Amino acid sequence: EANHHAGFGPGGPHFCLGASLARREMAVTMTECLRAFPDMEVSGPPRKTRSNFLHVLAELPVSYTP
């Protein structure tokens, strides 16, 4: 008997089509921030968003010299 379960996860019919674009945008953003502010560093603990579906930082304090 075939299993017609369509589970959530890193692939399949429920995978977000924009996920790869979002990862690329974040990589470019962080690269450019570090290029502009080479001394940027995390200055406090991250605060996560509570969600059953997303793994998201609501806040990540950083410090740098302008």
Image (tube, helix red, strand yellow):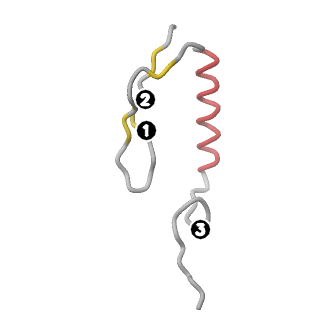
Q: Relative to residue 45, is residue 53 depicted above or below?
A: below
Cβ atoms at labels 1 and 3 below 8 Å apart: no
Distance, label 1 to label 2, CA atoms, is 7 Å
Q: Residues within 10 Å of mark 3 (few under 14, many from 20)?
A: few
Q: Splitting the image into 4 quarters, where does residue 2 fall?
A: bottom right
- Mark 2, other Cα within 10 Å: few <14 / some 14–19 / many ≥20: few
Mark 1: amino acid: Leu
Amino acid type assigned to the residue bearing label 3 in the image: Pro
Left or right of 32 in this view: 6: left
| Disc 1 + disc 2, Cβ < 8 Å | yes
Where is residue 52? Give x, y as percent. 38, 56
What residue is shown with label 3?
13
Q: Which badge, 2 or 3, is on the more N-terminal residue? A: 3
Could you give the CA–CA distance between mark 1 and mark 3, rounded to whole angstroms? 26 Å
Residue 29 is situated, as x and y percent measured from the top left of the image, at 60, 29
Circles 2 and 3: CB atoms closer than 8 Å:
no
Residue 16, which numbered label? none
Image coords of residue 13 (percent x, y):
59, 68
Badge 3 element:
loop
Q: Is residue 36 left or right of residue 48?
A: right
Seen from this angle, which residue lies furthest top? 66
Query: Residue at the location (37% across, 43% down)?
Result: 49
Q: Which residue is mark 2?
A: 60
Which element type, helix, strand or loop, lies under badge 1? strand
Which quadrant of the figure contains the N terminus?
Answer: bottom right
Which residue in the protein does label 1 denote? Answer: 57
1 or 3: mark nearer the eye: 1
Question: What is the C-alpha distance between the residues marked 2 and 3?
Answer: 32 Å
